[in-house]
Image: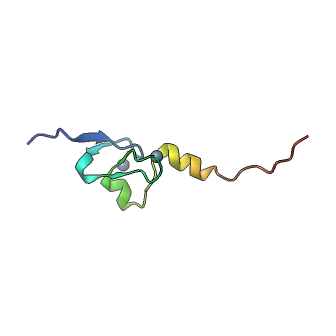
Amino acid sequence: MQETDGMICRACGNEERASEGYPCAECETFICLICSFRGVTLCKACAEKQGGQTEPPAAGP
Ligand SMILES: [Zn+2]
Ligand SMILES: [Zn+2]
């Protein structure tokens, strides 16, 4: 049994099978099946981007 299609999940960091994963909804990097079961559709980097999307009010000088 060969596991040649292992890829690192960009959400949890585990190596999972690429054929059983999903692409990140944002950048299409690899998200593993386990994460997608948990409702994760974005990789870590994109999740952080989305999470901090509340832009601060433009209180310029
Ligand atoms: Zn994962
Ligand atoms: Zn992403």
Q: Residue at x 27, y 45 (%)?
A: 16
The picture places residue 12, in percent across and down from the top left corner, at 40, 45
The picture places residue 59, in percent across and down from the top left corner, at 86, 47
Q: Is residue 32 above or below residue 15?
A: below
Which residue extends farthest front? 27
* Residue 11 in the figure: left or right of residue 54: left
The quarter holding residue 60 reads top right
The picture places residue 42, in percent across and down from the top left corner, at 46, 52
The picture places residue 36, in percent across and down from the top left corner, at 37, 58
Q: Residue at x 25, y 53 (%)?
A: 20
Quarter holding the C terminus is top right
The quarter holding residue 39 reads bottom left
Q: Residue at x 8, y 42 (%)?
A: 1
Which residue extends farthest left? 1
The quarter holding residue 8 reads top left
Colouring: rainbow
* Residue 1 in the figure: left or right of residue 13: left
* Residue 16 in the figure: left or right of residue 10: left
Which residue extends farthest right? 61
